[in-house]
Image (tube, helix red, strand yellow):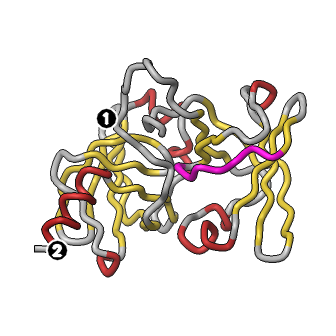
C-alpha cells in the first residue's frame, strides 16, 4: 500500500526488452536503500525490485503492465516518481493507493495560474472508472484532489512544491499519464452496478 506522496524522482538510465517484459534500470537517491523483492511505486505502478547497485535499481514490467500504463513509453533520461510502501503506523498523508493503475489518461490542458498550475485530463469512460468532485485520484503515483469532474474529464491543481518534486512538470498537452482511481469509489461503483 502507498499514500501517493512522492519520496523522490528517479531517472531511467537503462531499458532492456526480454520477450514481452521490459526491464527498467532506475537511478535514484533511494536505490541503494532498496532490497530485492521490495515493492516500489514507479509512476504509480507497483513494481518489484529485482536488482540493486550503489546508485540504481532494476524492476521488471510485464506485458499486462505495459498495456495498461505509460511505463512502456518511458525513454532513457525520463523522470519517474518513486514511493516506497507505507510503513505500518505511519501517517497516511495522501490517500490509500494500491499501486495498481486502472488506466491511462491524456492531458488536454495545462494552465499556469500565477504560482500554481491547473492540469486537465481525459480518460476512456468505457472502463467504467469514475472521478468524483473533490475526490482523490492518483496521477503517475501522486495523490491529488480532482475537481471539475464531468463525464470523462477532470482537473487537478498543482502547488509549486508538487510541481518541483514530481514529474508532473514534464506533463504537457498530449502526454499520457497513469491513473489509479480511488479504491473506495471503485467499490461503491461496483456495488451500485450489482444492484
193 to 91, vertically: above or below: below
Q: Quadrant of residue 18?
A: bottom right
In this rendering, position of residue 85 left or right of residue 122: right
In this rendering, position of residue 21 left or right of residue 192: right
Q: Secondary structure at mark 1?
A: loop
Give the distance between the C-alpha atoms of the residues marked 1 and 2, in whole angstroms.
45 Å
Secondary structure mostly seen in magenta is: strand
| Closer to viewer: mark 1 or mark 2 | 2
Q: Is residue 45 magenta?
A: yes
Quadrant assignment for the C terminus:
bottom left
Question: In percent of the image, x 84 and y 69: which residue is there?
Answer: 17
- In the image, residue 179 lies at what x, y percent? 43, 58
- In the image, residue 9 lies at what x, y percent? 64, 36
- In the image, residue 164 lies at what x, y percent? 52, 32
How many other residues sit within 10 Å of disc 2, few (<14), some (14-19) or many (≥20)? few
41 to 185, vertically: above or below: above
Q: Residue furthest front?
A: 195
Question: In percent of the image, x 58 and y 64: which residue is there?
Answer: 70
**Start and end of the magenta stretch?**
44-50
Q: Quadrant of residue 159?
A: top left
- The circle drawn on residue 114 is 1
Amino acid at each position: 500500500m502507498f499514500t501517493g506522496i512522492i519520496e523522490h524522482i528517479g531517472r531511467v538510465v537503462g531499458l532492456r526488452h526480454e520477450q514481452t517484459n521490459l526491464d527498467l534500470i532506475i537511478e535514484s537517491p533511494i536505490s541503494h536503500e532498496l532490497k530485492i523483492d521490495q515493492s516500489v511505486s514507479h509512476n504509480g505502478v507497483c513494481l518489484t525490485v529485482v536488482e540493486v547497485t550503489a546508485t540504481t535499481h532494476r524492476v521488471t514490467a510485464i506485458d499486462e503492465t505495459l498495456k495498461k500504463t505509460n511505463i512502456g513509453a518511458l525513454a532513457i533520461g525520463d523522470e519517474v516518481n518513486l514511493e516506497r510502501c507505507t510503513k505500518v503506523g505511519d501517517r497516511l498523508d495522501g490517500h490509500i493507493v494500491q499501486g495498481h493503475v486502472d488506466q491511462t489518461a491524456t492531458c488536454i490542458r495545462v494552465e499556469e495560474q500565477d504560482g500554481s498550475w491547473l492540469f486537465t485530463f481525459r480518460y476512456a469512460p468505457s472502463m467504467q472508472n469514475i472521478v468524483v468532485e473533490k475526490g482523490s485520484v492518483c496521477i503517475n503515483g501522486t495523490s491529488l484532489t480532482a475537481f471539475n469532474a464531468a463525464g470523462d474529464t477532470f482537473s487537478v491543481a498543482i502547488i509549486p512544491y508538487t510541481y518541483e518534486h514530481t514529474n508532473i512538470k514534464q506533463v504537457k498537452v498530449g502526454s499520457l499519464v497513469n491513473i489509479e482511481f480511488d479504491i473506495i469509489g471503485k467499490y461503491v461503483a461496483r456495488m451500485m452496478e450489482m444492484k
